[in-house]
Image (tube, grey):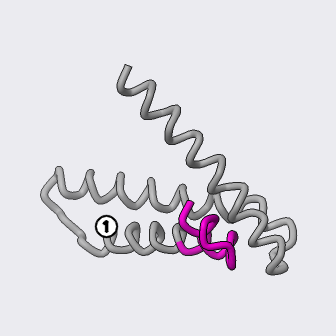
């Protein structure tokens, strides 16, 4: 049940974030690349964190992987906020 709920919540979050970042990228002139840009950011976060976990598990930690994933997460949050700007409620949501 918990896993199912987590997948549903993650899917809702991804769909909303994807739509907001795609619209922002289209406004900024990314053209057709705007449709894959949000997926690239989220996939980058997942891959970097998975690789960090794997390397830590086999005792070859590389902290730069986790820090880069965090930077991509901050970028996603910033892009979502910028998509709703200047509406303060939209930025908060």
Q: Nearer the viewer, residue 76 or 57?
A: 76
The residue at 68%/70% (across/down) is 84
The residue at 54%/57% (across/down) is 42
**Badge 1 element:** helix
Residue 72 sits inside the magenta stretch: no
Q: Residue 6: horizontal and vertical position, in percent?
A: 42, 34
Quarter that holds the N terminus: top left
Magenta segment, prevailing SS (helix, strand or loop): helix
**The quarter of the displayed image where residue 73 is located:** bottom left
Q: Residue 28: horizontal and vertical position, in percent?
A: 80, 80
- Stretch of the chain drawn in magenta: 78-93
The residue at 64%/65% (across/down) is 90
Residue 79 sits inside the magenta stretch: yes
21 left or right of 45 in image: right
Residue at mark 1: 66
Q: Residue 15: horizontal and vertical position, in percent?
A: 65, 47
Q: Nearer the viewer, residue 16 or 69?
A: 16
Q: Residue 63: horizontal and vertical position, in percent?
A: 24, 72
Q: Nearer the viewer, residue 71 or 56?
A: 71
15 left or right of 26 in image: left
**The quarter of the displayed image where residue 70 is located:** bottom left
Quarter that holds the C terminus: bottom right
Q: Nearer the viewer, residue 75 or 32?
A: 75
Q: How many discs mark residues in the rendered view?
A: 1
Mark 1: few/some/many CA within 10 Å (<14, 14-19, 20+): some
């Amino acid at each position: 049940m918990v896993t199912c709920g987590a997948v549903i919540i993650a899917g809702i979050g991804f769909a909303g974030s994807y739509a907001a970042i795609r619209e922002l990228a289209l406004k900024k002139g990314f053209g057709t690349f705007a449709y894959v840009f949000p997926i690239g950011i989220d996939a980058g976060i997942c891959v970097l964190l998975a690789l960090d976990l794997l390397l830590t598990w086999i005792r070859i930690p590389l902290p730069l992987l986790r820090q880069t994933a965090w930077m991509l997460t901050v970028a996603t949050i910033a892009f979502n906020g910028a998509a709703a700007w200047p509406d303060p409620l939209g930025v908060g949501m």
